[in-house]
Image: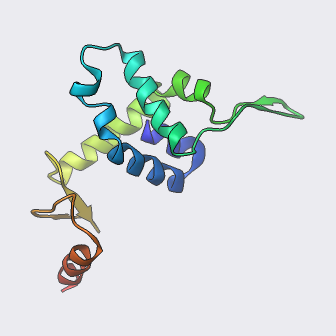
């Protein structure tokens, strides 16, 4: 879904969406969803996008006809689309594997896998790591 957000709204919106997904991961883990349908999972990720303020209210009409904005309906219709969502995610996954990312948390900076990283690191720790990376 992050690829779809990026495709439709740009890289800044994608970063906002990814941060929101990380923040709300308890809403889509097994404990929250249990035995559910694919559409239930899609609805959770759509709600995250909506709560992050990334969805548009409606469509607009232009001289060329009706233009689809990034609405709830658009998200739900396209979040599992091969070209807009699944294939880009699959490609990114293959790139991550090529860098040696086989689990989380892993971080690749300037094409270098940073060993032993933690998702809880704040700016001070990352500043220290980045300074050492430049050496």
Give the answer, above or below, for where 128 lies relative to 67.
below
Q: Residue at x 54, y 43 (%)?
A: 7
Name which residue lies at 39% across and 32% down. Answer: 87
- Quadrant of the rendered image containing residue 132: bottom left
Q: Residue furthest left?
A: 116
Query: 10 or 13: which is nearer to us?
Result: 13
93 with respect to 116 (left or right): right
Q: Position of residue 42 (x, y in %)?
A: 43, 24
Residue 9, x across and y down, in percent? 59, 46
Percent from the top left, x then y, of residue 122? 26, 69
In the orientation shown, which residue stands out farthest toward the right?
63
- Relative to 10, 89 lies left or right: left
52 in relation to 75, above or below: below
Q: Residue furthest bottom?
A: 135
Query: Depth check: 5 or 86 in front?
Result: 5
From the viewer's perspective, is residue 92 above or below residue 44?
below
Residue name at image x 21 percent, y 75 percent: 125
Observer-nearest of 124 and 68: 124
The N terminus sits in image quarter:
top left
Q: How was this image coloured?
A: rainbow
Q: Quadrant of the C terminus?
A: bottom left
- Count all numbered tags in the image, as a single digit: 0
């Amino acid at each position: 879904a992050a690829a779809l957000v990026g495709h439709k709204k740009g890289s800044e919106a994608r970063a906002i969406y990814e941060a929101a997904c990380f923040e709300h991961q308890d809403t889509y883990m097994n404990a929250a969803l249990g035995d559910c349908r694919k559409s239930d999972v899609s609805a959770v990720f759509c709600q995250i996008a909506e709560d992050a303020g990334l969805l548009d209210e409606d469509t607009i009409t232009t001289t060329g006809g009706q233009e689809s904005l990034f609405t709830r309906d658009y998200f739900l219709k396209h979040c599992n689309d091969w070209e807009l969502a699944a294939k880009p995610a699959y490609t990114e996954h293959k790139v991550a594997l090529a860098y040696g990312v086989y689990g989380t948390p892993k971080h690749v900076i300037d094409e270098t896998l940073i060993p032993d990283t933690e998702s809880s690191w704040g700016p001070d720790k990352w500043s220290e790591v980045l300074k050492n990376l430049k050496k």
